[in-house]
Image: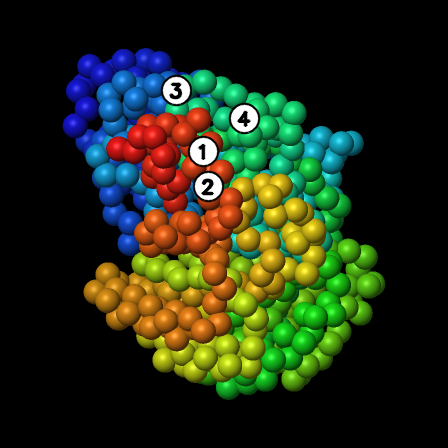
Amino acid sequence: MIAESALQALRASLRGPVVVPQDSDYDDVRRIHNAMIDRRPAAIVRCAGVADVVAAVKFARQHALLVAVRGAGHNIAGTSLCEGGVVIDLSRMKSVRVDPARRTVRVEAGATWADLNHELQVFDLAATGGYVGTTGVSGLTLGGGLGWMVRKHGLALDNVLAVDVVTADGRVLTASASENADLFWAVRGGGGNFGIVTSFEFKVHPAGVVWAGLTMHPLTRATSVLRFWREYEKTAPEEVTNGALLFHPPAELPLPEVLHHEGIVGVGGVYCGALERGEQALHPLRQFGPPAADTFAQIPYSQAQVMADFLWPAGLQNYWKSSYLTDLSDAAIETIVARYATVPSRRTLVVVEHNGDGAMNRVDEGATAFGHRRWPYNLLVTSIWDSPAESDTNIRWTRDFFDAMQPFLADGVYVNYLGDEGQERVRAAYGTQYDRLVALKGKYDPTNFFRMNQNIRPSVSTP
């Protein structure tokens, strides 16, 4: 518990409210995407602006309180929620300011990718980052920023021009290529380890109307579909960013009965380029099979940004495992298909992303703190279920799936897909960048004040 007098002083220093366990809206405010994470912070500071963030940081330091930082609360590990400490909640900070002449946008840290691209759509522009619209701009960008334009325009963090950061000692710094350049390097991939980024400036790209959608086949054809997709991706232009996924559709989705009965292997994504060329580029994908259903259409990019949101609804039990793949071999495909055939929950999805052979790979490996640019494929097992009583079964199935895939996994993992998996997996996420990140952690956060994250521990002093 925090003393009432201390809370009163904190409230007096803020524009936004402070929510505590006694408040009627406490349970709603503390709720995050993954229902498996059930922690009770002593206070949630709902920041209205940068001054509130600074005040919250100084308050937590003064009272030696554990701090978690929340953007959209979408991260699977649930690090945006702490037990007994202070949550610095940025979710009300959603300002978006577009400069169409410069093709840049300034966005606050509480915005989601749906928020951002909704505003950009007015100008026929889009920001690269995010496969799901409910994902927060901040958390995704700080860890990398895969999304529907990654092959054409790179990671979200590759498109960051500058950030504003509140450091562990309450300073407000701007970081860019010309100002606090070491901090700018660190936050582009190093997550929330170095401070609270309150706003980002991105370069954005023309993408008014795009081709977007999904081709769907019965799961019984999964092996042949995945093999075809692997070969298709070898010649697909950079304007195409596609993924393959195995899932069972919601009952209310209007699809052929065979797909509801057997489940789906789907291949789809976004083509961001000249529409007539997109139709030609997607033709082989849309003809193979042919698919039992095909949703590809010309739609605004802001709609493409949210087209997969229904597959990952908030408020359910989630447990994920992920790693890059060395290759999408026949044996890897066969293992994926065989393991998914035993899935215990119809809500669970397995995704294979193809992010490589494009703009992300042309950025020098040491240019940012992002750990791995050379692996073209990424495997993501997102186990989702309704009841906590089903947790043991679903977690065991996920771990067994991941163990069976070990022969095909690369020595790296995308940090944004990590759960609570220990320090060695954090090291694996950063690879050769890790030692430099440790040194910069010692400079900007030597006491590990920001440690509710995929933590990079300073070498000097760790609580």
Q: Which of marks 2 and 4 is nearer the N terminus?
A: 4
Q: Would residue 207 appear left or right of 427 to someone viewing this image?
A: right
- Residue corresponding to mark 4: 164
- The residue lying at 58 percent from left, 41 percent from top is 368
- Residue corresponding to mark 2: 435
Dot 4 amino acid type: Asp
- Residue corresponding to mark 1: 439
Res. 51 visible in picture: yes
Label 1 sits on a secondary structure element that is: helix
The x and y percentages for residue 342 are: 36, 80
- Image quarter in which the N terminus is found: top left
Q: Do the residues labelled 2 and 1 touch (CB within 8 Å)?
A: yes
- The residue lying at 36 percent from left, 23 percent from top is 57
Crowding near pointer 3: few (<14 within 10 Å), some, many (20+)?
some
Label 4 sits on a secondary structure element that is: strand
Dot 2 amino acid type: Asp
Q: Do the residues labelled 2 and 3 touch (CB within 8 Å)?
A: no
Q: Earlier in the sequence, mark 4 or mark 1?
A: 4
